[in-house]
Amino acid sequence: MRLEDNIYFAGENTVASVCNQFGTPLYLYDSDKIVEQIKTFKQAFNWPKLKVKFAMKSLSNISILKLMKAHGVELDAVSLYEAETGFFAGYKPSQIMYTPSGVKFDELEEGVLKGYQINVDNLSTLEKFGEKYGNTVPCCLRINPHIKAGGNHKIQTGHKDSKFGISLLQIDQILEITKKYDIVINGLHMHTGSEIYEIDPYIEGAKVLFKLAQNFAHLDFIDFGSGFKVAYKDGDKVTDLKKLGDNLVAEFSAFCDSYGKELEMWFEPGKFLVSESGVLLVKANVVKQTPYSTFVGVDSGLNHLIRPMMYDSYHEIVNVSNPTGKVQNYNVVGYICETDTFAWDRPLNEVREGDILAIKNAGAYGFSMSSNYNSRPRPAEALIVNGVPQLIRNRETIQDILKNQIDIFQEEEIKI
Ligand code: LLP
């Protein structure tokens, strides 16, 4: 989205015309921005065997996945359904890293049958994996390196009390199980959380993996996960990717020398690739003045973008319809019967009923975390390709809300 002569444009069209064409609420993504982020990412990590696996949990629309694929990006999936979506988008199973957490062993078996790269995150599953497959199917180990990183405790995943990964302190048990069944460990993985702008946690975590790696003779890759922080507002700290890349590549290179093999370097960025590419466009339904403050009630809510309510995340908001209006403070709230506040006491250009507001940085974990709460349909999604917005998901309707419900009473009179 860009402002030219006080008019907001998305590609070649005005944002207002895109909203007229597809309606609101609308998730609108810019493919140019996604491609730019992919390039920046690849340039930062100058390693010949670099693999970027898009964390599709952040945005799983098949048109987005196809765009990723066209730019040499593979996939990180956390459920069989995500992996299947990736397959549907044209990925080979071998390009899909499957990292479930706390699932029944059946789901791992299904993943093996499909041919995904399996990532095991607990000892009980490792034991079952060994029993069933011995040395016939390789697997990766998700290690918990006991590193507390990232701002918000709700999105930290690599500390000692986290449910994710196998503790680095359990290496003896890992080795016992892998030896007992002759399991081929072809990769080591970590993911310590999201929104980590410091470089140190990545390097510290990498060192943990390098040390453990010397126990495994058949590694093909090390997966350093993700968590790269992007700017949600002016002045936000972001991960210095170039500096991280230079440091990590140097450490990795030294490790590979000592390991005796040039391994693949994997990452699983979600937010970095898509967050800034997306906006959620909503319409101001009501402007409500109370004796204390002014609320703007929009045609969306926590059912469409839950991040502000779940993590207290800051999302910049702009009034697309009135960019020169007098700035006043507003509480921007949703239409859900909960306190679903997008922004509290936020300076915005004067908002009038009917104005379009753009909620920025909505590309990652926006649509993918949406729901039908209050029986409200999910928004449509559109992608700007070569300057032109194209619909990539229809807006849901009442039929979508009702389609899986079973009316057991039908025409009968209810006698209970
Ligand atoms: N790899 C694994 C194993 C993950 O669990 C995640 C995110 C990623 C990669 C991608 O991380 P990213 O690059 O997006 O930071 N829903 C939250 C964040 C939790 C994400 C969970 N896992 C949010 O809206 O901020």
Image (spheres, helix red, strand yellow):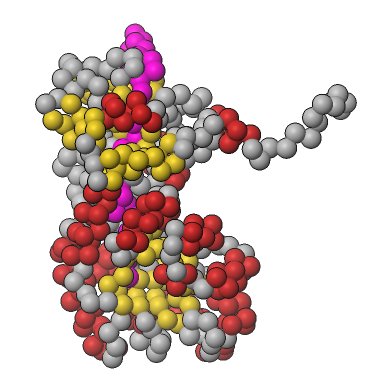
118 within the magenta span:
no
Q: Residue at 24%, 36% (x, y): give it.
A: 10
Q: Quadrant of the N terminus?
A: top left
On screen, residue 370 above or below 117: above
Residue 13 coordinates in the image, percent (x, y): 24, 33
Q: Quadrant of residue 52?
A: bottom left
The magenta region covers 266-294
- Judging depth in this view, the residue of 50 and 62 nearest the camera is 62
Q: Indicate the quadrant containing the C terminus: top left, top right, bottom left or bottom right.
A: top right
Question: Percent from the top left, x then y, of residue 77?
Answer: 45, 61
Residue 279 on the magenta segment: yes
Q: Residue furthest left?
A: 5
179 shown above or below 404: below
Q: Is residue 384 left or right of residue 142?
A: left
Along the viewing direction, whichever of 292 and 356 lies nearer the viewer: 356
Instruction: Give residue 110's position: percent from left, percent from top.
Output: 59, 69
Q: Residue at x 30, y 19 (%)?
A: 355
Residue at 82%, 26% in the rendered image? 411
Name the image quarter holding residue 265: bottom left
Q: Nearer the viewer, residue 231 or 158?
A: 231
Whether residue 134 is visible to the viewer of this picture, yes or no, is yes
Quadrant housing residue 334? top left
In this rendering, would 28 be left or right of 376?
left
Q: Residue furthest top?
A: 291
Q: Is residue 256 above or below residue 328?
A: below
